[in-house]
Amino acid sequence: MFIHIVPSLFHLMANKCHLESITIPELDFKIEGEALSTGRPHPNKNIWVGMKKGRKAINGLLLKTDKHLSSFTADYQWNIENLGMIKHHVTTYVEDDEFDMVSQDIMLNGGFDGWKSRVHSAYENLAPVRIQPKMESFLNKPGKDTHDVWKEYSWGDFLLSREESLLLHTIQSERLNTECSMFRRLPSTDQAIII
């Protein structure tokens, strides 16, 4: 099974940021420090994405395991210069085992280039940006119904931690090979980290 994780941070401030670690307890997987890099593979340069070190700006990391998981938890720790560590906790529920991959990139789960949409029905009529798990450093809309923890400053609210859940159907790993220009920054199966 391929697992495409996308640690992402929406960061509007000038402070530098870096992904410090990724932990997936169900796979006994941890990658940290110098093994990771942070880049901006999207046209919106306020979106920072964690990736394996030594690569061009790629959208996330691809893992390969013999285990077939019905759920897994990814813990991402980001370091924001002069503000410290922030934590993003994403629990992903895998709803089937029809294909060989799950991806936290919601656009990759959609229908494109002849591929049928595999976006979960719970997200029907929602824009991908509303579904995509992401951490934010500057919280502009704190809400009572979230699991967000933030610290208030005179300049605004700084998000310290966020917990999210994501429902995914499996997809075909061949989607990573698409010629569609919006997916040119995806990891390839030969770049997968074997667990």
Image: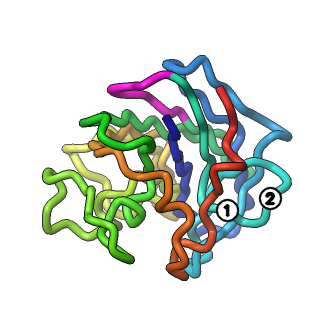
Question: In the picture provided, is 154 more to the left or to the right than 42?
Answer: left
Percent across and percent down for residue 36 are 76, 44
Q: Nearer the viewer, residue 57 or 77?
A: 57
Residue at (14%, 51%) from the top-left corner? 122
Percent across and percent down for residue 16 are 74, 60
Under mark 2, the amino acid is Arg
Residue at (53%, 56%) from the top-left corner? 137
Label 1: how many Cα within 10 Å (few below 14, some 14–19, many 20+): many
Quadrant of the image for the C terminus? top right
Q: Which residue is mark 1?
A: 58
Residue at (57%, 41%) from the top-left corner? 86
Q: Nearer the viewer, residue 182 or 48?
A: 182
Please tell me the numbered disc located at residue 70.
none
Under mark 1, the amino acid is Ile
Q: Nearer the viewer, residue 35 or 46?
A: 35
Question: In the picture provided, is 73 more to the left or to the right than 33?
Answer: left
Asked if the magenta segment contains residue 71, the reply would be yes
Q: Is residue 154 visible?
A: no
Numbered marks: total: 2
In this rendering, the answer to whether 192 lies above or below 10 is: above
Q: CA distance from mark 2 to mark 1?
A: 7 Å
The region drawn magenta spans 67-75
Residue at (55%, 78%) from the top-left corner? 179
Q: Nearer the viewer, residue 100 or 128?
A: 100
Q: Which residue is mark 2?
A: 55
Percent across and percent down for residue 191 are 72, 49
Label 2: how many Cα within 10 Å (few below 14, some 14–19, many 20+): few
Question: In the picture provided, is 44 more to the left or to the right than 90?
Answer: right
Q: Quadrant of residue 163?
A: top left
Local SS, label 1: loop
Q: Quick check: marks 2 and 1 in contact, CB under 8 Å? A: yes
